Amino acid sequence: MESKTRPFDIGDMVVYPAHGVGRIESVQKRTINGAVLDFYILKLLNTQTIVMIPTCNVCSVGLRSVIDPCEIPRIYALFRESRNTTDPTSAWNKRYRDYAERIKSGSIDDIAIVFRELHRLKTAKDLSFGERKLHDLAQSLLVMELSTSRQMAEASILSEIEDIFQGKESATASIA
């Protein structure tokens, strides 16, 4: 009996760091520089882009499963935390680099922290162009993954997140 060497199967929903949620459409063999490799053929949900990822590079590119729905309250709790991990008085370009690295990590916790901090900063002052782009990217990545996990409309997830930031806890009490 052959052991499972690939962590994902066809049809699995996965997160490709900084690009979003996709579905494993197939696994194909391709010859690259004389070596035969297995590739995941991943279709990103937001752009319908097809991405080929060597199965042996899954860890190095950070491909991971979509968050389990039971983990979402932990993400919502991150939104409620009052501490900032980045000094909001530091230069915007230093914050930008820190936030960009966190988003590239693919960690949903890091993306949630970036979104939280930029969302709060946005209420205090105007964001730089780069920070606005990172805010929008973090929001898009979070909402896409959470809606996929819970099988809910993205607008409903965004509404829940906004309720958390506005202190309206009743909308999220059922999952938190």
Image (cartoon, grey):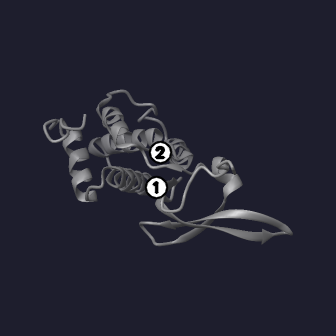
The percent coordinates of residue 171 (x first, y second) are: 15, 42
Snapshot quadrant of residue 68: top left
Name the residue beneath numbered marker 2.
Answer: 92
If you read the primary sequence from the N terminus, does the residue marked by circle 1 or circle 2 appear first? 2
At which x and y percent is residue 75? 36, 37
Find the residue positioned furthest to the right: 34
| Quadrant in the rendering for residue 29 | bottom right
Secondary structure of the residue carrying tag 2 is helix
Residue found 31% across the figure and 40% down from its top: 120
Locate the C terminus by quadrant. top left
- Element on which disc 1 rests: helix
Alpha carbon distance from label 1 to label 2: 9 Å
Q: Residue at x 45, y 32 (%)?
A: 87
Say if mark 1 contacts mark 2, CB within 8 Å. Answer: yes
- Nearest the camera: 60 or 91? 60
**Would you say 19 lies left or right of 120 here?**
right
Return the residue nearer the eye: 18 or 87.
18
Work out whether residue 4 or residue 143 is closer to the camera in this orientation and state it: 4
For label 1, the crowd category at 10 Å Cα-Cα, with few meaning under 14, some 14 to 19 and many 20 or more, is some
27 horizontally vs 167: left or right: right
Residue type pointed to by label 1 = Gly
Vertical side of 171 occupied by 43: above or below: below
Q: Position of residue 64 (x, y in %)?
A: 53, 48
Residue 130, numbered label: 1
Circle number at residue 15 = none
Kind of residue at disc 2: Trp
Number of numbered discs = 2
Left or right: where does residue 176 sit relative to residue 88? left
